[in-house]
């Protein structure tokens, strides 16, 4: 009986740890999914800009609108403590995210600024996509250079 009581206490005590580990995994998957959505919407814009696929104004505007919407997402919940590279397998997030949260927030805000108006800016022809991609790509690169494992 004493063994069962101790075992029950041990299992109960371990539940919060398991729940936290599961939360970290969910957060990492959510963060990676968010980045994948950005990438999936950048891809057709890049392909159009390079002439790999025909320019399609409606598709370009929709992809850019999706990026605009995604950059309005409140991402801090996707960057909880314990999900940095080295703390969690599969994470490329550098500890600088948590060490310099104001810098990280400014970097993410720069992506939002780069995306602002993109859905209108890509209209009117293939030549209009390049400048939008340069702004978006620059914002992505700046953030990744400081906050993502290379």
Image: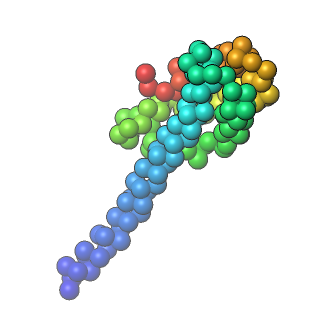
* Frontmost residue, 98 versus 69: 69
Left or right, residue 113 beside residue 50: right
Quadrant where the image shows the C terminus: top left
Visible residue check, residue 135? no
- Which corner quadrant of the image does residue 117 belong to? top right
Is residue 41 rendered to the left or right of residue 2?
right
Q: Residue 25 versus residue 114: which sits nearer the camera?
A: 114
Q: Mark yes or no: residue 26 visible.
A: yes
User: Residue at 59% of width from left, 27% of height from top?
Assistant: 44
Question: How far across and down, in percent of the image, does residue 64 sit?
Answer: 69, 31
- Position above or below: 16 against 56: below
* Residue at (42, 36) in percent of width and height: 91
Residue farthest front in this picture: 54
Give the image location of residue 131, x and y in percent.
71, 15
Residue 139 higher or lower than 70, as above or below: above
Q: Nearer the viewer, residue 50 or 64?
A: 50
Point out residue 83 in the picture as x, y percentages from the top left corner. 45, 42
């Amino acid at each position: 009986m004493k063994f069962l009581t101790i075992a029950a206490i041990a299992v109960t005590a371990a539940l919060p740890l398991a729940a936290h580990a599961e939360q970290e995994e969910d957060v990492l998957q959510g963060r990676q999914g968010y980045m994948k959505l950005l990438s999936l919407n950048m891809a057709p814009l890049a392909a159009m800009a390079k002439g790999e696929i025909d320019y399609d104004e409606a598709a370009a505007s929709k992809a850019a609108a999706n990026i605009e919407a995604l950059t309005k997402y409140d991402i801090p919940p996707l960057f909880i403590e314990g999900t940095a590279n080295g703390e969690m397998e599969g994470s490329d997030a550098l500890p600088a995210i948590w060490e310099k949260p104001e810098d990280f927030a400014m970097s993410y805000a720069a992506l939002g600024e780069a995306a602002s108006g993109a859905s209108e800016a890509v209209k009117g022809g293939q030549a209009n996509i390049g400048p939008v991609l340069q702004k978006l790509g620059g914002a992505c690169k700046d953030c990744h250079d400081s906050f993502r494992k290379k």
